[in-house]
Image: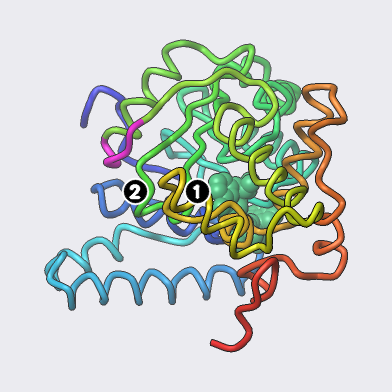
């Protein structure tokens, strides 16, 4: 056991992020216990793990034995209570403050004082989530923290670590060490709307929608200019499709409210696509059309 003292990692939410977090935890030698309230999500997550690990085996990145051992380190809980004997739970459910607060309220009741309660939220206040945990168990806000992984989790290097107002420094230190044990680089940020990553990235994406709406250039030209001129690996509008246009609009609203400025509101063009159900990769049509292959 390393200094962070963590061997068992609970993950709530078996979607794109939670599945990836459980996978890298298991690949790094931790026991990962995943819980999702939807059986369908669990089945999809298992299938993704099988596919990714057998692909890694085929490419010679991991031996067949290691792939099997990694899979065996991921188990699925039937109930949130089964996460009680973990040293950290990382929550990755939908980006909805009410749902997250309810999950943390439950977590504070089923875990002991030694369990860190981490959220993978992209924008929601860790202080607010910590207060919901504290309401169920006094002192739980001290062990509540943001652990913001990026998609796709196995590939992206950064974990943005966000301290809520009450987060204990010892908890921050353990989470930074844990991220290192998972092969990631942790960088701390304080608890303000959008933290650092989305406070800087999302207004740029939003501005790309304004440039499109104003007729400055067509979407593919906006993306080409930013890729070739700024050395971005992906243009801002393609990236918006990748993240999800609904998520982008939601984060801009969180910024507008949290930073108390209307200049952060989602561009009408972005809102219009969300209203039309064009959400990006997940609906195979957003700014760009992916329906034909
Ligand atoms: P997703 O929709 O793929 O997965 C969410 C999962 O949570 C679903 O499987 C759903 O069944 C489950 N869930 C919902 N409510 C639950 C509950 N009460 N208890 C248990 N399970 C529940 O979403 P995602 O893209 O994996 O995002 C999850 C979180 O990660 C969000 O907070 C999001 O902002 C954050 N995040 C997303 C990205 C990204 O690029 N997608 C990047 C960084 C952070």
Q: Which residue is drawn at 34% across and 48% down?
A: 25
Q: Residue at x 78, y 22 (%)?
A: 259
Residue 175 lies within the magenta run: no
Q: Is residue 46 visible?
A: yes
- SS of the residue under disc 2: helix
Per the rendered image, the range of residues in magenta is 181-185
Residue 123 found in image quarter? top right
Specify whether tag 2 is near ligand 1 (CB below 8 Å).
Answer: no
Location of residue 85 with respect to 28 vertically, above or below: above
Sequence-wise first label, 1 or 2: 1
Sort mark 2 into few (<14), some (14-19) or many (20+) by Cα contacts within 10 Å.
Answer: many
Q: Residue furthest bottom?
A: 292
Q: Can residue 92 be seen in this view?
A: no
For label 1, the residue is 11
* Disc 1 to disc 2: CB gap under 8 Å: yes
Residue 87 found in image quarter? top left
Q: Position of residue 274 (x, y in %)?
A: 81, 62
Q: Which residue is drawn at 31% across and 53% down?
A: 26
Q: Main secondary structure of the magenta part?
A: loop
For label 2, the residue is 25
Q: Position of residue 197 (x, y in %)?
A: 55, 34
Q: Where is residue 220 in the image (x, y as percent from the top left)?
A: 60, 65
- SS of the residue under disc 1: strand
14 lies left or right of 60: right
């Amino acid at each position: 056991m390393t200094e962070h003292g963590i061997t068992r990692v609970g993950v709530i939410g078996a979607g794109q992020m939670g599945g990836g977090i459980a996978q890298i935890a298991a690949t790094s030698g931790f026991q990962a216990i995943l819980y999702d309230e939807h059986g369908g999500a669990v089945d999809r997550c298992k299938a993704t793990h099988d596919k990714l690990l057998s692909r890694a085996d085929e490419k010679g990145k991991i031996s067949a034995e290691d792939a099997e051992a990694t899979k065996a380190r991921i188990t699925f809980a039937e109930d949130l209570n089964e996460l009680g004997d973990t040293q950290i739970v990382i929550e990755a459910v939908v980006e909805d403050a009410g749902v997250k607060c309810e999950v943390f309220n439950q977590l504070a009741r089923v875990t002991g004082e030694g369990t860190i309660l981490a959220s993978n939220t992209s924008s929601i206040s860790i202080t607010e989530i910590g207060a919901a945990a504290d309401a169920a168990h006094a002192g739980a806000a001290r062990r509540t923290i943001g652990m913001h992984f990026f998609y796709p989790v196995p590939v992206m290097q950064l974990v943005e670590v966000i301290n809520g107002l009450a987060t204990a420094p010892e908890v921050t230190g353990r989470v930074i060490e844990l991220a290192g044990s998972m092969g990631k680089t942790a960088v701390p940020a304080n608890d303000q709307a959008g933290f650092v990553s989305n406070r800087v990235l999302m207004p740029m994406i939003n501005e790309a929608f304004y440039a499109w709406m104003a007729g400055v250039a067509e979407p593919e030209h906006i993306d080409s200019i930013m890729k070739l001129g700024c050395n971005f690996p992906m243009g801002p509008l393609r990236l918006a499709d990748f993240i999800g246009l609904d998520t982008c609009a939601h984060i801009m609203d969180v910024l507008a409210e949290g930073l108390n400025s209307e200049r952060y509101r989602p561009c009408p063009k972005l809102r219009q696509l969300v209203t039309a159900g064009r959400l990006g990769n997940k609906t195979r049509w957003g700014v760009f059309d992916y329906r034909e292959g």
